[in-house]
Amino acid sequence: MGSPEMYINRGSTINLTCVVEHSPEPPANILWTHNNQEINYDSPRGGVSVITEKGDVTVSYLLIQKARPSDTGRYSCAPTSANAQEIQVHVLNDLRGPAAMQHGGQLKLEYPLSAFLLSISVLVLGT
């Protein structure tokens, strides 16, 4: 079984959320990657940011504004205290056709010391 997939319109905001729970302590780091490359938040592309809230439940948000076709690819969230989880994101020029259905995914895995949930949401800007 492959990873979840998401289809979104160009120009939308991609919001990937990684939730780490049931961990004895918050993870020291949560690494976000795109196509196996660490995401550079200071890149010339701009519009890419991460917000991480640590606590009993740690939540990390990867926000990609004004999605473009080059943002298509496999994204992963890798907390230091759990295995990485992935989602395949497809940025399309137009989602109006019947074959281009929007799919959101949610994946939760339990680990002996920790678990995390990767959930994905999309804010579509205009049509």
Image (cartoon, helix red, strand yellow):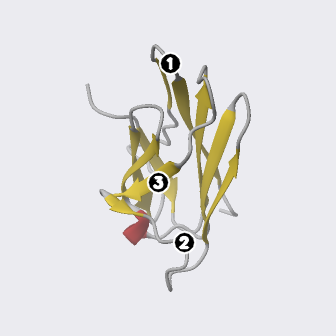
> Which label number is shown at residue 82?
none
- Badge 2 amino acid: Tyr
Q: Earlier in the sequence, mark 1 or mark 2?
A: 2
Pointer 3: what residue? 32
**Count of labels in the image:** 3
Q: Check contact, mark 3 vs mark 1: CB within 8 A.
A: no
In which quadrant will I find the N terminus? top left
Pointer 1: what residue? 113
Q: Earlier in the sequence, mark 3 or mark 1?
A: 3
> Which label number is shown at residue 41?
2
Query: Label 1, label 2: how many angstroms apart (C-alpha)?
Result: 30 Å
Horizontal side, residue 29 vs residue 25: left or right: left
Q: Secondary structure at mark 1?
A: loop
How many C-alpha atoms fall within 10 Å of the one at disc 2: few (<14), some, or many (≥20)? some
In which quadrant will I find the C terminus? bottom right
Query: Label 3, label 1: how many angstroms apart (C-alpha)?
Result: 21 Å
Q: Residue at x 46, y 45 (%)?
A: 77
- Badge 3 amino acid: Trp
Q: Residue at x 52, y 23 (%)?
A: 115
How many C-alpha atoms fall within 10 Å of the one at disc 1: few (<14), some, or many (≥20)? few
Q: Earlier in the sequence, mark 2 or mark 3?
A: 3
